[in-house]
Amino acid sequence: MNSRLRGNDNQKILNIKSYIRATLQEFVKSKGLDAEAVKIIIERPKDEGNGDYSTNLAMVISKQLKKNPKETAEEICYYFNNLPPSGGGWRGVSKTEPAGPGFLNIWVNDDYYRNVLNIILKDSVLYGKLDINSGKTANLEWVSANPTGPLHLGHGRQVALGKAVANLLEWSGYEVTREYYYNDAGNQMENLSKSVYARYREMYETGFPFPEDGYVGDYVIEIAKLIKDEYSDKLILDPDNPVFRTAGENYCFKSIKNTLHRFGINHDVFYNESSLYESGKIKETLEDFKNKGLSYEQEGAVWLKTSELLKDKKEAQDKVIVKSTGEPTYRLPDMVYHIDKIKRGFEMIVDIFGADHGDTYKEVLAGVAGLGYDPSKIKVIIHQMVTFVQDGKPVKMSKRSGNVYELDDLLDDVGEDVAQFFFVMRSANTHLDFDIGLAKEQSDKNPVFYLQYAHARICGILRNAAEVFPEYNKGVNADFNLLKEKEELDLMKALSLFPDVVEGAYKTLEPHKIITYLNEAAENYHKFYHNHRVINKENPELSYARLKLCEAARIVLRNGFDIIGIKAPERM
């Protein structure tokens, strides 16, 4: 149960869904059944005429009770209707009705929603925060691009997704370590060094051959110019000088960090792959695999028996973890790295990878498990690719120079909030179409601005209220019993769902669910605003109640924005 729906000193108010679930479990127990073994599904009906919630419990347990589902549903109704009132003198559920062949529709008492307003206003920035993971630690590793160039568009979805997932973990109670792992030990860094040297040499020797697998971006020329400015021609005949690699790595990492900073992301840990070799952990792990009989040598290479370690053994094949050249493949350091994270004591370890890692991460986790470590703590999020479209057609995002369109270029074009929102607004496991035209739209047609306008509009109303009712900001008592209109109640119902939505989004690590909810909340707010006058000098009592309702909506929108990682503007 979340801690931010706790009520005031006079009355404890439970999360209504938890209250309904607990009541259904008590009914199950009263029938002599094991409540823990019975799967209770509680859903919100699509048709509001079918109540606030519905459950199929009667259909689930009717066989065990040797009764038909409809008869069981009627018994559950009777059980609800005879519950004693709460300590505050009201009932959490106002009405229940059997429906169909064994469903149960449930209506929540309006007083519950009115009391939730008090909680929202009291908790403010804490409303929706959970304590289910209080005192626990989580490690989130994402982006992890090698420092061989600036972040490009292909990194965008992962950057934004990780930011939101980190926020979501914190809202569930975790203390989160944001981590970046990069390969500074492989051929890619050597290629960067050779590329920088070639561009440096070109400045003194036109036509100097450029490596076939070199990095061709303009940034390589910029790095070479920095080296020339500092060393002049002293390094022309010294291609193996570590300056070329170090300068390239430092330049690229500075660029990467600057882009992440624009997104509001600051990693706590930057973990170098090279440290796994320097510490001897790679060698130690190879010995562990050998001693456990999980590896073997063939044609000069070291192979891991993944065919035995993977659960799906039909298609599994053994994989090389050390090439015949003596160079480890990426699988080995990845296994060692994840073992290190487990040893650091995190209760949850989250990785975010692109679709190209869809199969390989399973091999890494199998290796971790093979050495006796529990991989159940490791949650892997795989995100699908992004297509950039304009006017319904795919477009190639490239700059005038013909070079790769970098992530910074997108931020320049559409802004940080829009980029963050668009990259997160769909489920990570689905393909994403990023509509450039819509992203540039400066109106409520843009889904980001639609939500931000709602927040800014509420802030404007509250500013006006301070002028019309000078006493309002000094503290007034609002009578929420005056809120009886359908649109008022619908908005209160929507706002009451926020903690539940946060918990559901956390459990699946899907921040797009927050956006779906915010759209629903904003839609309910707009319906309320367009149908009812908020500020009315002739009726200050009703105005106070409606202004408090507006405040509550503003709090929920702002808190939701905080999770998905966008700003909550007060003016637009």
Image: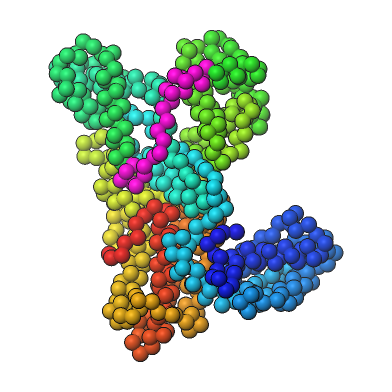
Residue 551 horizontal/vertical position (percent): 40, 71
Asked whether residue 394 is in view, the answer is no
Residue 81 horizontal/vertical position (percent): 71, 77
Asked if residue 469 is among those painted magenta in the image, a careful observer would answer: no
Look at the image and give the residue range highlighted in magenta. Answer: 260-283
Is 125 placed above or below 322 here? below
Q: Residue at x 31, y 61 (%)?
A: 569
Residue sticking out furthest to the right = 66
Q: Residue at x 42, y 75 (%)?
A: 548
Residue sticking out furthest to the front = 9
Left/right placement of residue 152 relative to residue 36 reads: left
Task: Identify the image quadrant of the C terminus.
Answer: bottom left
Dividing the picture into quarters, in which one does residue 342 lie?
top right
Left/right placement of residue 393 relative to residue 556 reads: left
Nearer to me, 356 or 86: 86
Q: How many numbered badges does the structure rendering display?
A: 0
Left/right placement of residue 63 relative to residue 571 reads: right
Q: Residue at x 40, y 56 (%)?
A: 562
Is 285 placed above or below 521 here? above
Residue sticking out furthest to the bottom = 538
Residue 188 horizontal/vertical position (percent): 37, 23
Look at the image and name its color scheme: rainbow
Task: Identify the image quadrant of the N terminus.
Answer: bottom right
Residue 156 horizontal/vertical position (percent): 37, 43
Nearer to me, 277 or 3: 3
Q: Residue at x 73, y 77 (%)?
A: 82
Asked whether residue 106 is in view, the answer is yes
